[in-house]
Structures are given as structure tokens and as C-alpha cells.
Amino acid sequence: MVEEILSGEELVTCPNCRTANHPGAVVCVVCGIRLDTYEQINRQWEKKQQIQLEKSLENWQDSEYLINKSKLSYYKNHLSKQILFIILTTILVIPVVFGILFLIRYQQERKFARLSTEYKQGVECYNNEDFYCAKNTFNNIILEEPDFQDSQSFLIKSRLGLVVDYKNKGLLSQALIELNDLSKEIPGDPHVLIELKDVHLKLAEQYLNSNDYESSISELNAIIQITPGDQTTEALISKTYQDWYKYAVSHKDWFRVWWIKQQLKERNILIPR
């Protein structure tokens, strides 16, 4: 090899495996490729690979375009179906909604007409002083529609009128029940308090006439709770205790005499002789 180099001949390097071959070698001693045509074949192969790569790229781009086009078409069709569905739904729903609204309004109008008729009947009952009828009529209206016109006011007036009826008929217990209910619903109402005081006073007189002094005093005490410091009622309580004391003495109920005497002392009431 030294001789060959010295003789001026150069070694041939294989372009594939970089092995040094003898000068004039046609085939590489290691990888076996042809040294004289390798470069040409390699350039042809690289060109072929480049062409295939470009074709693959074009095919991929065409495929991507078709996929995108298919997706776009799908989305368009889907959107069109959705729009069509919304339009059809709207066409179907709008009449239903209007129908429901019309039905609600129709029912409200019928309800208003019916309540108006009942209201007129209630007013007529009140004007005819049929307070029981008026009370039931306005009560039914308020149960269904609490703020219908001035039904609340008419109901209170009807119940107070009914109380007066009960008092005139001597049904004081029923009048008291009605007034106690009213005092809970409208506490502090002056008309209710006046009637309540009057009923308790009539009950006290009624019990006193039947010599039921204890019940009479209980009714008078109820008046004191309604109007604290009422001097007239306080005087009636004192007189009733004194009459009760005399009654117990006359019937020789000594235990009751002793008990009443204690009550008179606590209230600073003069003990009768």
C-alpha cells in the first residue's frame, strides 16, 4: 500500500461505509456497493424519495382537506337540523303558551266575576242586617282571595253586627267567643274592645242575678284587663264582694265568709256589718 501511495495512485474511499479501497476498485470490499455508479444511483434514489415524500404530502393535504370538508358539511347539516328543530318547536310551543295564558286569563276573569257576585250578595246580606250570612260570604271570599276589594272590612263589620245580634238574643257566650276571636285577629281594635267590655258586663249582671258571685267577679276582672284602672268596674267588683259576703253570712257558709273576708282585706274593701 505504501508503494501504491508512493507511486502516486490514490485510494478510493467508499461513499457508503467510508472504507478505503484499492485504486481502481469497482466494488467496495466491505459493503459491496459499486463505487463507480453509487453517486448517480444515490442521487436518483434521493430524488425518488423526494418525489414520494412530495406525493405523500400532497395526499395527506388532500386527505386533510377532505376530512375538514366532511366535518364542515356535518356541522352545517347538524346546525341546519338544530335551526329547523328550533323553528318547529317555536311554531308548536307558541300556540300552546298562548293557549295556556288565555286559559289562565279566562279562569281569572271567571273567578273575578264569581267573587264579584258573591261580594254583592255579602253586601246585600249586610245591608239587610243578616250578619250571619254576610260573615260566611265574606269569609269565603277572603279564604280564596284575601285582598278582594274591601271584603276584610265588611267581614269585621259583619262579625261585630253578629255580636250585637247575639247580645240582643241573650246569647252572650256566643258573642264572647266571636269577640275573643276578633281580639286575636285585630288586637287593640276600639270597636272590639267596647263590645267585649259590654258583653263581660252583661255576663257579670247575669251571674249576679243568679247569685253566682264568683263568676260575676271573674267577668268584672276580665273588664279590668281590657281597660285597666276602670273606676266604675272597680266599684262594681267591691260591691259584688260585699254582696257576696252578706249572702254567705245569710246562708251561714262560714268558710266562704272567711275566704271573702280575706279578699276584702287584700283589696282594702270595707267589710259589711
Image: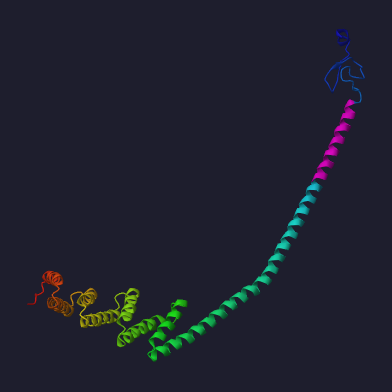
The outermost residue toward the front is: 252
At horizontal 65% and vertical 71% (from top left) the residue drawn is: 93
Which quadrant of the figure has residue 86?
Answer: bottom right
Residue 238 among magenta residues: no
Q: Is residue 198 left or right of residue 18?
A: left
Q: Is residue 3 above or below residue 163?
A: above
Secondary structure mostly seen in the magenta stretch: helix
Residue 50 among magenta residues: yes
Relative image position of residue 64 (x, y in whole percent) = 78, 48
Specify whether residue 48 is in view. Answer: yes
At horizontal 28% and vertical 82% (from top left) the residue drawn is: 195
Relative image position of residue 254 (x, y in whole percent) = 13, 71
Q: Is residue 165 left or right of residue 244?
A: right
Which quadrant of the figure has residue 52?
Answer: top right
Relative image position of residue 167 (x, y in whole percent) = 30, 85
- Identify the magenta region: 38-60
Q: Is residue 57 left or right of residue 124?
A: right
Relative image position of residue 273 (x, y in whole percent) = 7, 77
The outermost residue toward the bottom is: 128
Quadrant containing the N terminus in the rendered view: top right
At horizontal 39% and vertical 80% (from top left) the residue drawn is: 152
